[in-house]
Structures are given as C-alpha cells and as structure tokens.
Image (cartoon, rainbow, N blue to C red):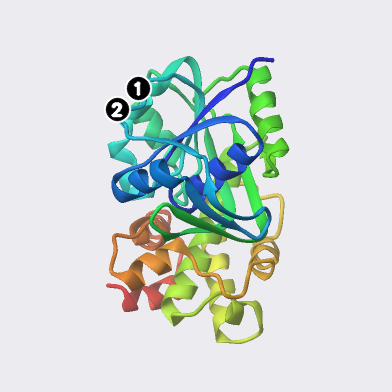
Amino acid sequence: MKRLKYLIVGTGGVGGSIAAFLTLAGKNVSCIARGESLKAIKQRGMIFHSDMKGDYPHLPVKAYSEEEYTDKADAIFVTVKGYSIDSIGDILRKAAHDKTVVIPVLNVYGTGKRIKQLVPEINVLDGCIYIVGFKSGVGEISQLGEVFHLVFGVPSWATCDDDLLTQVTADLLDAGIKTTLSDDINRDTFIKWSYISAMSVTGAYYDIPMGPIQHPGKERDTFIGLTKESAAIGERLGIDFGCDMVEHHLKVMDSLDPESTASMQKDLKAGNQSEIQGQLFDIIALGKELGVATPVYDEVVKKFR
C-alpha cells in the first residue's frame, strides 16, 4: 500500500487533534489554517495538550494557507464549523485528484450531502466524531479525556474503493484514534447530531460544564428530554438506531471530563459565531416539518431567541 496523503481543512479542536495524532504517528498529513494560527504553527509548531498523548510545545504539524497548498491529497477531512461549509469549495477542488475521498466530521446532520452539492465532481463521504477538543490559544489545541472516536462511511450517493477505506481506517487506528467504518452512516450521523445537540443545548441553557449533567437533577433531566425528542424525529424519518438513544447518550456523556464544555457553548459565551442554527433551531424546524412535538426544545429555545 502506498503512503496516503491526508489534508485537514479546519484546524480547530477537532481538526487540530486529528492532525496532531496523525503527525505523532508519522503519517503524511497537512492542514489548512488561517491568520495568526497559521503564522504561529509555522513559526514554532502546534502547541498540543492531550490527555491521551501528553504535552507537545512544538509539534511539527505542516500548515498551509489555501493559496500555499499545491499538493493533492488522498483523503481530506473537513472539520470546519457548519456555518463555514460554503467557503470550502475552492480548496476541495484544488486539493482533490480523481480518487480522493472527502470525509466531513461536523456536528450538524446532512453536511456530507451539502458538501457533495457544493463539489459534485468529488467523491464525498459522510462522518462524525466524538471528542472534547478545543482551541486553547493561538496555534494551540487541547484534547481532553479518553474519548476520541471517528465514524465514517459511504452514503447512498457515493462509491469508494474498499482498499482506500481500509487503509484510511488502519492509519487512524495506528494513530490512536478509535475508528468505525459505518455500515449506515446516515444513522450514525443522526445519532451524533442528536447527542451533540442535547449536550450543547443543555450546557448552554444552564451555563454549566458536563459535570452537573452527569448526576441526577434538572440538568440531566433536560438532557434526557432533548434526547427523547430528537430520537422521535429520527424515528419519524425512518432511522433504525439499533440502540436505546437515551442509554447511548448518557453513556457518552458520563465518560466525558466533567469540566469540559461544548464548542457551541464556548462560542456563545464568547460572543462568537456559533453552530446554534444547526444544533438547536434546525432540530425544532425539522420536528415541526414532521409533526413531532418538541416541548423541551421549545422551552429551552426561549433563552436564545
């Protein structure tokens, strides 16, 4: 097997962590960065703090601007925020060859299809990720806890060489990233959307880290209520989850660092652009479209209108 070339589009907590883990494993990985982050990583490497890998003050991650990157990647991970999807078309066209696979791992359901519509000539898969990772400084990434699970698969609109999928999976596993090649990526991306929405919305509504949600109380009840409502939406869409959604979500929630917070919550608190549209308003809108009642969502959304 040839040595694959990886490109990470977006160097926030998720993209930066993927790039760092692949770099530490000796894989051929580059990332697209901007502004002061790009300058800092070029000058002294990425500062990377990881509960799984340790601390690296000068990790030699290869970083480029969109204009500087001239190579062709075999696999491109898209890790930008949902509101930035429309801005990535040019770099995907520039960096892809005829067999490249694009693997989006965002927090909003349906992003694979959106990217495919943006670049119909490129083979776009779909995916999601479970991780607590965030920008902790300029060119600095922190990864907390022992949860780092990347799920990807081939959706109905795509085809992919099995050998390439096998090698991407092997490289991620070799880098220490738990990886699942999904047999139903539509199901798995919906489950992640449901989870990240319940987690982010509960944390932002009460302005708390994960700790209080991990114990009995009104915060945990809200998390469970949101989960049940999004699960009802998924069932109306005909998705067979193959698990109890409440049980699944609580298991993931209870495994997190109790001091961690969701990225949407961090962005809202800092007054930055956030993914609140995709993680809150879109779920309520889909529920109304499908005739699914969402009383818990309807109550918490009052804080954010």
Q: Position of residue 138 (x, y in %)?
A: 38, 56
- In the foreground, 169 or 222: 169
Q: What residue does disc 2 label?
A: 90
Of residues 297 and 172, the one drawn nearer to the viewer in this rendering: 172
Q: Position of residue 150 (x, y in %)?
A: 62, 44
Is residue 10 in view?
A: no
Q: Residue at x 37, y 48 (%)?
A: 40
The relative height of residue 48 versus residue 24 in the rendered view (above or below) is below
Count neighbours of disc 2 (C-alpha within 10 A) and say few if under 14, some if 14 to 19, many if 20 or more. few
| Residue at the image position 70 percent from the left and 44 percent from the top | 176
Q: Identify the residue under disc 1.
A: 93
Farthest residue in the top direction? 98
Location of residue 279 by image quarter: bottom left
Quarter of image, res 21:
top right
Q: CA distance from mark 1 to mark 2?
A: 5 Å
Residue 285's x, y, as percent? 36, 58
Q: Establish if 283 lies above or below 123.
A: below
- Classify the position of the C terminus by image quarter: bottom left
**Residue type indicated by callout 2:** Asp
At mark 1, the secondary structure is helix
Q: Looking at the image, which is closer to me, 202 or 230?
A: 202
Identity of the amino acid at label 1? Arg
User: Disc number at residue 200?
Assistant: none
Percent x, y of residue 14: 51, 50
187 lies left or right of 204: right
Residue in the foreground of this view, choosing between 268 and 246: 268
Of the 4 image quadrants, the one containing the N terminus is: top right
> Which residue is outermost to the bottom?
217
Few, some or many C-alpha atoms within 10 Å of disc 1 (few <14, some 14-19, many ≥20)? some
Position of 12 with respect to 174 (left or right) is left
